[in-house]
Amino acid sequence: MQVWIRQSLVDAILVGKLQAGQKMPATRELASSLGVGRNTVTAAYDALVSDGFLEARERMGYFVGTVDLVPAPEPAPERQSDPAPTQGRRLCWRQHLKARPSQMRGIRKVADWQEYRYPFVYGQVDRTLFPVEQWRACSREALALSAIDFWAADRALDDDPMLVEMLCRHVLPQRGIFARRDEVMITLGSQHGIFLLSQLLLRAGDAVGVEDPGYPDARNIFDARRAFIQRLAVDDRGLVLDARAEAVLRKTTLVCVTPAHHCPTMVSLRDDRREKLLELADREDFLIIEDDYEGEIRSEQTPPALKSIDRSGRVLYVGTMSKVLAPGVRIGYIVGGAELIAEARAMRRLMHRSAPLNNQRTAALLLANGHYDSTVRLVRQTLSYRWRAARRAMDRHMPGFAVSHSVGGSSLWVRCPPQVDARRLIAAAAERGVLVEAGDPFVAPEMAGRFFRLGLSAIDWQLIEPGIAEIAKAVAAMRREPVAG
């Protein structure tokens, strides 16, 4: 309420509804009219005095201060006849826009996912797992004068040295990666890292290998670079490296893979295929982007990073802290050769200079104090329990649906039987309070309506089985519907 009172009064002052020198209502009077405590109003007034919006006059009360006001807009004069603008004066954006990223085929997130009783949504934060108190404590520590002196400065190329050190010492070695400081750069999440690498490594017409099914926005990023997209099949052992794939890889500049938990099936790339992919990269002279977006929440069976067995430096590792903390934290990183990282820093400077250094320092302190590791353990345990519960429920209630053979992760990838259209099923499940995500953005257009994804990052484990039971009921109801014609 205190924040709301302050914001409301600031808005009224800035647009001129409250004039400079105008006496404010007494704190007791305003508190009574709003139904709040007098101390709440007094605290709001005092904060506005500190900010210069109000003045406190002894024995007289509070008055609107003298601030730079934004005059209220004058109403536009009415016109008897306003002729339509001519074509020559109207701006036609279709003639000016050289790219239309809004029309690319991608994942559409449901804004009101929390309103569903059974939210099988991927990638959203579970507030019961986020280390709120620890993040607050580290944020306060990041506000110490010595820390502020660093992160408040304009550092066009720099990252927080403490965060880079913590990544090199604590995070990356757990994935089997040992890197120097000059081989690590902070990004605004893993997708930002893929975008930066595409800018540095691709020209129009270069061939790029992507997984099929695969992460749609990686494909969109390469498409925006006018690259020639080559789809590479994925089965229950990960990326398929048969004769056709080898023929494709001979002509590629870059390959983007998710070998730990494949997006979206969650299968892991098997050891023999890992070795073969690296062998092909050396022989055919292409680079590999390893998108390890779920590296921190791996299961015990998840293999180490592909980068850990890279002997020639061809694997460019992209990681993130978002899956453990929250998507809005926006902290990721790239690991690669020092020369590449130097150029990536220069490219990042052209976009937005450094990633927010205050958040970097807070994350560094979270790592240094051990809070991040404890959160990682909690998230892994929770997701492992939910994953097992979801697998059991799918086997029990939906035996005709094929679930990918993953070893863990934060979602299940499900293929519908031939007689069930996933799009109709998703709509029917929504009517029962179950949010299920479409699989269409991940697959080729000819496979539309065959798959859906059950996200496990935000749903309570006790709701998993009843939610899947509701999906099964939706399937049964669909099968009872009469067929038109």
Image: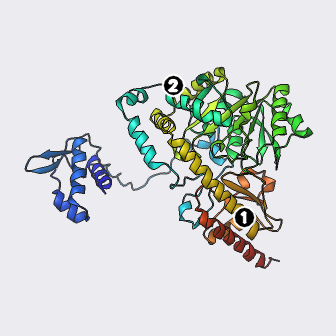
- In the picture provided, is 444 more to the left or to the right than 363? right
- In front of the other: 64 or 265: 265
Q: Residue at x 84, y 38 (%)?
A: 272
**Quadrant, the C terminus:** bottom right
Percent across and percent down for residue 353 are: 51, 28
- What residue sits 19% from the left and 44% below the top? 65
For marks 2 and 1, the one nearer the N-term is 2
Q: Residue drawn 25% across and 62% down?
A: 36
In front here: 297 or 36? 297
- Compared with residue 62, is residue 155 higher up or lower down, i.e. above or below? above
Q: Which residue is mark 2?
A: 158
Percent across and percent down for residue 206 are: 77, 31
Q: Secondary structure at mark 2?
A: loop
Which quadrant does the N terminus fall into? bottom left
Q: Amino acid at mark 1?
A: Arg
Mark 1 highlights which residue? 392
Is residue 108 visible in the rendered image? The answer is no
Q: Residue at x 84, y 27 (%)?
A: 284
* View extreme (top): residue: 339
Q: Nearer the viewer, residue 400 or 181?
A: 181
Left or right: 271 in relation to 94: right
Q: Of residues 88 and 363, which is closer to you in this image? A: 363
Amino acid type shown at disc 2: Asp
Q: Position of residue 157 (x, y in %)?
A: 52, 24
